[in-house]
Image (cartoon, rainbow, N blue to C red):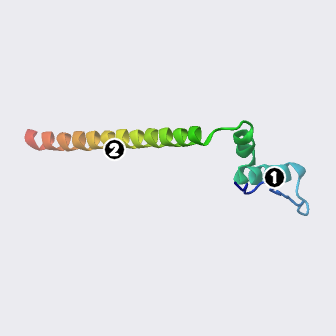
Amino acid sequence: MSKQNTHVNVRVREKKGEPFERMVKRFLKKVKKERIVEQVKERRYYEKPSVTKRKAKLAGIAKWKKAQAEKKQKELQRESNYNKRFDKKKEN
């Protein structure tokens, strides 16, 4: 199993007249974009492939359930709005 992105160089060069704090901010932004900190945390402990698959499956199920709940909520809201308009027409 080959490791990809095992060595990542994040370089930030000082721009003319740029404050040090700004340069540090750009560096941290690049580090976040490359997900270096997350990779270190993930690789801190070995996780069996079966556990990784199980976590991914559970995350997918949770995402699906959330999407279904949001869809149901939108349908209920749409139905409620329709009923309000229909009731107003009845009153007139």
Residue 80 in the image: above or below residue 10: above
The disc at residue 71 is 2
Query: How many numbered discs, if any?
Result: 2
Quadrant for the C terminus, please.
top left
Q: Position of residue 60 (x, y in %)?
A: 47, 43
Residue 31 is situated, as x and y percent measured from the top left of the image, at 76, 51
Q: Does residue 2 lie above or below 37 as drawn?
A: below
- Residue at 80% x, 56% y is 8
**Rendering quarter of residue 74:** top left
Residue contact between numbered discs 1 and 2, judged by CB atoms under 8 Å: no
Q: Position of residue 63 (x, y in %)?
A: 45, 42
Q: Give the residue at x 36% y 38%.
A: 69
Between discs 1 and 2, the one toward the N terminus: 1
Amino acid found under the numbered disc labelled 1: Phe
Amino acid type, residue under disc 2 in the picture: Lys
Q: Nearer the viewer, residue 69 or 5?
A: 5
Res. 62 mark: none
What whole-number distance in Å separates the C-alpha atoms at marks 1 and 2?
40 Å
When asked about the image quadrant of residue 43, the answer is top right
Location of the N terminus by quadrant is bottom right
The x, y position of residue 34, in whole percent, is 72, 54
Q: Which element type, helix, strand or loop, lies under badge 1?
A: helix
Write down the residue under mark 1.
27
Along the line of sight, which residue is nearer the eye, 7 or 17? 7
Q: Residues within 10 Å of mark 1 (few under 14, many from 20)?
A: some
Left or right: residue 61 compared with residue 30: left
Residue 8 vertical position relative to residue 62 in the rendered view, above or below: below
Left or right of 60 in this view: 20:
right
Q: Residue furthest bottom?
A: 16
Query: For the view shown, which residue lies furthest in the front direction?
Result: 1
Q: Secondary structure at mark 2?
A: helix
